[in-house]
Image: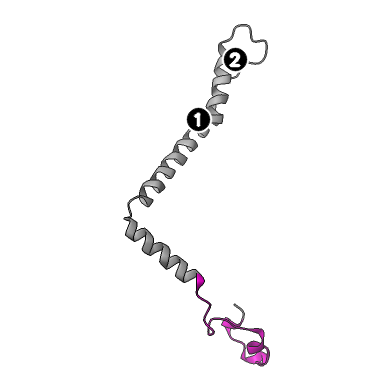
Amino acid sequence: MIAVSWYAFNITQEFFDPLYPGIKYEIGEGLYIGWSSAIMALCGGSCLLFSCGLCSPEEKKSHLQNVRSYSCQPQSRHMVQTASTTSHVPSSEYRLNAYV
């Protein structure tokens, strides 16, 4: 938003300057798109900020503990499929989950 506003300021200064010898530009669609995208980004960020702030501190701690305990658990053995378990299966007995 700062860059778009700065560019718009420069355009308007050059447009109304009678001593400016260069080409005078007008504010165009790109500036309006830049301003609208900046406003939508600010609205989205404020929605995210307010939605994160609605939880109580106890809920935040329990959620953080759940995330930590989930990420530190090792994978179970039945979920891990190694090459040795699929390599001795005849080609006529391949199943769809062997490719995944």
Q: Which residues are magenta?
A: 72-98
Q: State the mark number for residue 76.
A: none
Q: Which residue is mark 2?
A: 14
Instruction: Give coordinates of residue 58: x percent, y percent.
Output: 33, 60
Q: Residues within 10 Å of mark 2 (few under 14, many from 20)?
A: some
* Residue 19 position within the rendered picture, expressed as x and y whole percent measured from the top left: 63, 6
The residue under the point 65% across, 16% down is 23
Residue visible at 50% across and 75% down in the picture: 73
> Judging from the image, what secondary structure is the residue with disc 2 in?
helix
Residue 44, position as x, y percentages in the image: 43, 44
Q: Which image quarter holds the C terminus?
A: bottom right
Please report whichever mark, 2 or 1, sits nearer to the chain's N-terminal start: 2
Location of residue 74 in the rendering, given as x and y in whole percent from the top left corner:
53, 77
How many discs appear?
Answer: 2
Residue farthest toward the top in the current orientation of the protein: 19
* Residue denoted by label 1: 32
Residue placed most toward the observer, 90 or 20: 20
Q: Is residue 97 above or below residue 3?
A: below
Callout 1: SS: helix
Amino acid type at circle 2 is Glu
Return the residue nearer the eye: 29 or 72.
72
Q: What is the three-letter code of the residue carrying label 1?
A: Tyr
| Residue 34 in view in this figure | yes
Distance Cα–Cα, label 2 vs label 1: 19 Å
